[in-house]
Amino acid sequence: MRHFVFLLLIVLFLVSACALPPEKAVTREELFRTGLYQQFLIEESPEQVLNMLNTYGEAIIEGKRNVPGKDYPVNIKMLATAEGIEILDYDR
């Protein structure tokens, strides 16, 4: 019985860690309201980012901070939540 409960907890943990598509599709206006394309230099088009967000619920892209004369490469993680788009950036 203990093994069954332990196995069930592990399965629930693994399933809850998966990214899910958002309940409400993210729009282009919501994406631009975040200021993502002003803060970072990103090669992916807004349509590609929206497709990732609406399909998987998250998008991880490479970019650079928009600082003139400087080169700051970053990884940008975006999560589509019920409250809107959450953006996390990490230095590479």
Image (cartoon, rainbow, N blue to C red):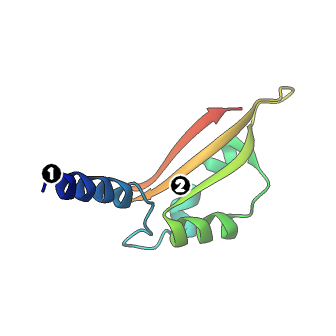
Give the position of the N terminus as an image quadrant: bottom left
Q: Nearer the viewer, residue 8 or 23?
A: 8
Q: Nearer the viewer, mark 2 or mark 1?
A: 1
**Label 1 is placed on what type of residue?**
Arg
Residue of label 1: 2
- Which residue occupies 27% across, 56% down? 7
Q: Nearer the viewer, residue 34 or 59?
A: 59
How far apart in space, not on screen, are marks 2 and 1 (Cα)?
49 Å
- Which residue occupies 74% across, 44% down? 63
Residue of label 2: 33
| Lower sequence index among marks 2 and 1 | 1
- Which residue occupies 68% across, 45% down? 38
Q: Position of residue 58 (x, y in %)?
A: 52, 58
Q: Position of residue 47 (x, y in %)?
A: 67, 70
Asked if one can make out residue 30 in the rendered structure from this viewpoint, the answer is: yes
Q: Residues within 10 Å of mark 1 (few under 14, many from 20)?
A: few
| Label 1: which secondary element | helix
**Label 2 is placed on what type of residue?**
Arg
Q: Is residue 82 left or right of residue 77?
A: left
Q: Residues within 10 Å of mark 2 (few under 14, many from 20)?
A: few
Q: Which mark is residue 22?
A: none
Q: Is residue 28 left or right of residue 8?
A: right
- Which residue occupies 68% across, 51% down? 61
Give the position of the C terminus as an image quadrant: top right
| Label 2: which secondary element | helix
Q: Position of residue 24 (x, y in %)?
A: 39, 73
Q: Position of residue 41 (x, y in %)?
A: 76, 45
